Each structure stands twice: as structure tokens, then as C-alpha cells.
Image: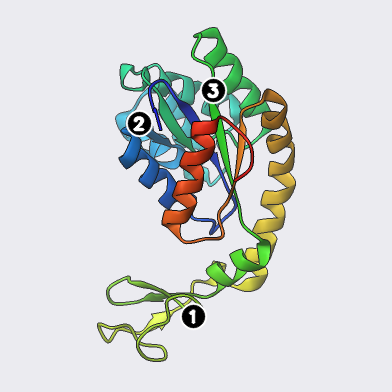
């Protein structure tokens, strides 16, 4: 993979392994990563005008509106650190945000090169997420189906395991349906732009990463 001047967006449903794949690709390619949540927290802590505007919404528990989020993304990408390319994780989430991003980058003559969409069957995502168990003592994460603990209800350190309320099957299925509804138009938009790269994310992380590298090398097509 030649990462020079690649500008990549990652999309994927909850529990698809997107964060892992972004980290792996960043380490391999050397591309800097912009993670929306981290960007929001960093800008708010820095006290920039846009960061403070975003903080007002976050403090109330409200979504940061597109007008503020778009401005924050553009200000972030103006940093020379991203001139040679970048990976975006967590933005855009809507077609309006996608239109802003593509327009902004085209004006700078640095168009978006790839949108990697990680696809995993919903039933597998439910098993991944609903099977999560977390140690109250050390924070280690297990999975009933893929990485079971050494003994029922207990971590290797002896700590008690618990399941987060938002990891229940009902909650996960609702989140996946919301994601599907909101993201379908976004995928269609990037498909029309000719930059969508769809990847099967149901395998082990290294195999998924190989598929991502393959589609980035080819510049398109499913893997």
C-alpha cells in the first residue's frame, strides 16, 4: 500500500472492529488519524472558539450540530500534519456532513481518496457485543462466545465479571438498526462518488486488515 496523499474515511457498525482496523492501518501506513470523539475533547480542552462551542452541546448531552462539527473538522485538517494524508474515524455520519467534507477537500485540491466500509452480518455483531464481559477489578474484556473467561463469572485476576447495560441484545439490535437506517444513504452517496471500498469484517483482525489493504491498493471493489 502506497499511503502517500491518501485521505481515508472509515465507516462501520458497532462492534465491527473499526477502531482496531484504523489503529492497524495507521501503524502500517504512518497516516495520522482524526478520531471525532478525541478531536472534540481535545478542542474543548484547548479552549478554541469552535471547541468551546462544541463543549456547550456536549455538556448538555446534545449532539454537536453539523455547523459546529464541520467547522471543527475543517480547522483540524488545516493542520500541516494532515497535508500528506489522513484517516478519519467517526466522521462523516450523515450525507450533509459527507457533502461538506468532499466539497471542502475538493476546494483544497486534496480530494477524498477512499471510504472503507466494514460490513459484518448483524447476527455476528450481536454475538460479539452481547457476549462481552468486563472485569470489575482490572477492566479486562472477555466474550462468552469468542474469548471465554477461565471460570464462570470470574476473570483471570479473580475479579468479578459483569455485562454493561448497553451491551444487552435488545440494545445492540436497536443500535444496529439505527446505524443501518442512518448509514445507508451515506454509503450510497460515497458509492456514487466512486470512493466506496466495502470490506468483509467477519474474519480475524489480521485477515480483515489484509482485505482493507487489498481494496486500497486496487482503488475499489468489494473484498
Within 10 Å of disc 1 (Cα), the crowding (few <14, some 14-19, many 20+) is: some
Q: Earlier in the sequence, mark 3 or mark 2?
A: 2
Compared with 164, 50 (above or below) is above
Q: Nearer the viewer, residue 172 or 105?
A: 105
Secondary structure of residue under mark 2: loop
Image quadrant occupied by the N terminus: top left
Looking at the image, is 195 positioned above or below residue 83?
below
Q: Residue at x 35, y 77 (%)?
A: 135
Q: How much space separates mark 1 and mark 3, taking CA atoms? A: 39 Å
Task: Report how far apart the C-alphas of labels 3 and 2 lie in the structure.
Answer: 14 Å
User: Helix, strand or loop at disc 1?
Assistant: loop
Tell whether 189 sits left or right of 111: right
Q: Residue at x 50, y 21 (%)?
A: 71
Residue 122 circle label: none
Provide residue 11's location: percent of width, then percent of height.
57, 42
Q: Which residue is mark 1?
A: 144
Find the residue positioned furthest to the left: 157
The residue singled out by tag 2 in the image is: 31
Crowd rating for badge 2 (residues with CA inside 10 Å; few <14, some 14–19, many 20+): many
* Residue 168 shows up from this direction: yes
Q: Which residue is disc 3 drawn over?
A: 112
Amino acid at each position: 500500500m502506497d499511503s502517500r496523499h491518501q485521505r481515508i474515511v472509515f465507516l462501520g457498525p458497532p462492534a465491527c472492529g473499526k477502531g482496531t482496523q484504523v489503529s492497524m492501518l495507521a501503524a502500517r501506513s504512518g497516516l495520522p488519524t482524526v478520531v471525532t470523539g478525541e478531536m472534540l475533547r481535545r478542542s474543548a480542552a484547548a479552549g478554541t472558539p469552535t471547541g468551546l462551542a462544541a463543549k456547550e452541546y456536549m455538556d448538555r448531552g446534545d449532539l454537536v450540530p453539523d455547523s459546529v462539527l464541520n467547522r471543527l473538522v475543517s480547522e483540524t485538517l488545516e493542520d500541516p500534519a494532515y497535508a500528506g494524508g489522513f484517516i478519519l474515524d467517526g466522521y462523516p455520519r450523515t450525507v450533509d456532513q459527507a457533502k461538506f467534507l468532499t466539497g471542502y477537500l475538493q476546494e483544497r485540491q486534496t480530494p477524498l481518496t477512499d471510504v472503507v466500509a466494514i460490513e459484518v452480518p448483524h447476527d455476528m455483531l450481536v454475538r460479539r457485543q452481547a457476549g462481552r464481559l468486563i472485569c470489575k477489578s482490572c477492566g479486562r474484556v472477555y466474550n462468552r462466545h469468542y474469548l471465554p473467561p477461565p471460570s464462570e463469572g470470574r476473570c483471570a485476576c479473580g475479579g468479578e465479571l459483569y455485562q454493561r447495560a448497553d451491551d444487552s441484545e435488545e440494545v445492540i439490535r436497536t443500535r444496529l438498526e439505527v446505524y443501518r437506517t442512518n448509514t445507508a444513504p451515506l454509503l450510497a452517496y460515497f458509492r456514487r462518488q466512486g470512493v466506496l471500498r466495502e470490506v468483509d469484517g467477519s474474519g480475524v483482525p489480521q485477515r480483515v486488515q489484509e482485505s482493507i489493504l487489498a481494496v486500497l491498493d486496487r482503488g475499489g471493489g468489494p473484498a
